[in-house]
Amino acid sequence: MQPSPLISFVVPCYNSAQYMRRAIDSILFDRDEPRERIQIILVNDGSTDETERIARQYEECHPGIVHVVSQPNGGHGAAVMAGVHAADGTYLKVLDSDDRLDTRALSELLHTVESFPPDNLPDLVLTDYVYDNHALKKNRRIGYRRTVPARRTLTWDQVSRPRMGSYFLMHAILYKRSVVIESGLELPRHTFYVDNLYASIPLRHTRTLYYLPVPLYYYYIGRDDQSVNEKVMISRLDQQLRVNRIMIDELRVEDISSRSLRRYLLHYLTIITSVSLTFAVLAKTPEAKAQGRDLLAYLKAHNYPAYRAYRRTPMSMGLSARGPGAHRFIRTTYSVIRKRFGFN
């Protein structure tokens, strides 16, 4: 009987024919590596280009390693969930089809996971990721050395207070598959920005973590149609707000015993709320401003600890200020952050 793979890589694909090979090949990096250690789930989410044909080619060339799931279009969240339910690895890693992994970092990750004692597997493995802006030929590596001790299994209470603006994106996260299943995670269909739900809801159910400071995930930014493009985010403000409200409902901290985990989840929720309110300002419409006010009212009514944490942040003071001067300050601050990280 073939052993379960160490890591199942879920690759959601929608009209990804132009770039999906790069993502897949970055996992299938070394013919000398034991292939039974990995599993690749390619989810074709109702593509209308050559995505299905390319995925089937990989499945045929790598039997037992690459598996294709085809479904009617349901959006990124539905594709991720299809991959999660098809996977049977010990750990889960989501790789978007326009991104890639660093091969040397992946090799080290595989050897590290293989070295974990079977009776003491960390619930969460963190790695660094890199903002990869090809248009500007600019990379920026994001890591967690200042808050998370490296290369040892920890409990949450050994993690330092999160720094302002620092949080664990999906690109940094490797979950134990059982944690994701037990969390009851269900990502909404036809909704963008569900990565924030994947990076937070299962996190409530983690007790131990391990930080491997290698630049594993290269997050490609710079395409005009990308969901993190400023104009696109403004046009999809309703979806950002929908995800934000789900987080408000799901990230309740009253029943979490670890003070450090409670603090981190509140920190994460305040950041996402600040992002939502910033784009409500950037939209420059009365409707968007009203949506921002409604979000704050919802936060206060449904998750008061998170509302209280948000009101203590410097960003809250700026976003609460009124008048054109305050809004100019918000736009200027956003512009500085965008340039620093190379966002488009």
Image (tube, helix red, strand yellow):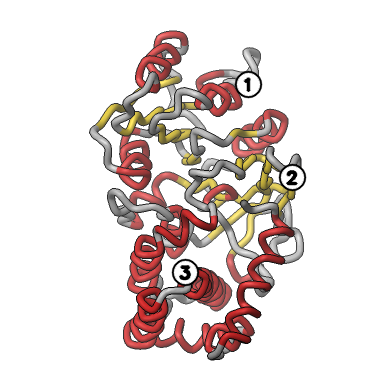
Return the x and y of residue 164 as percentages of the image width and height: 67, 73
Q: Which of marks 1 and 3 is in front?
A: 3
Q: Is mark 1 on a helix, strand or loop?
A: loop
State which tag comes first along the sequence, 1 or 3.
1
- Tell me which residue sits at (60%, 44%) in the image: 221
Cα separation, mark 2 vs mark 3, equals 28 Å
32 horizontally vs 253: left or right: right
Q: Residue furthest top?
A: 61
> What amino acid type should be assigned to the residue bearing mark 1?
Phe
Whether residue 110 is situated above or below residue 225 in the rendered picture: above
- Tell me which residue sits at (59%, 88%) in the image: 317
Return the x and y of residue 14 as percentages of the image width and height: 38, 33
Whether residue 90 is situated above or below residue 197 in the rendered picture: above
Quickly name the residue at label 1: 29
Quickly name the residue at label 2: 139
Q: How crowded is mark 1: few (under 14 residues within 10 Å), some or many (20 or more)?
A: some
320 horizontally vs 31: left or right: left
Instruction: Work out which quarter of the rendered image holds the N terminus and state it.
Output: top left
Cα separation, mark 2 vs mark 1, equals 22 Å
Cα separation, mark 1 vs mark 3, equals 43 Å
State which tag comes first along the sequence, 2 or 3.
2
| Residue 248 image-quadrant placement | bottom left
Are circles 2 and 3 on residues that touch, CB within 8 Å? no
Return the x and y of residue 113 as percentages of the image width and height: 60, 38
Quickly name the residue at label 3: 283
| Residue 335 image-quadrant placement | bottom right
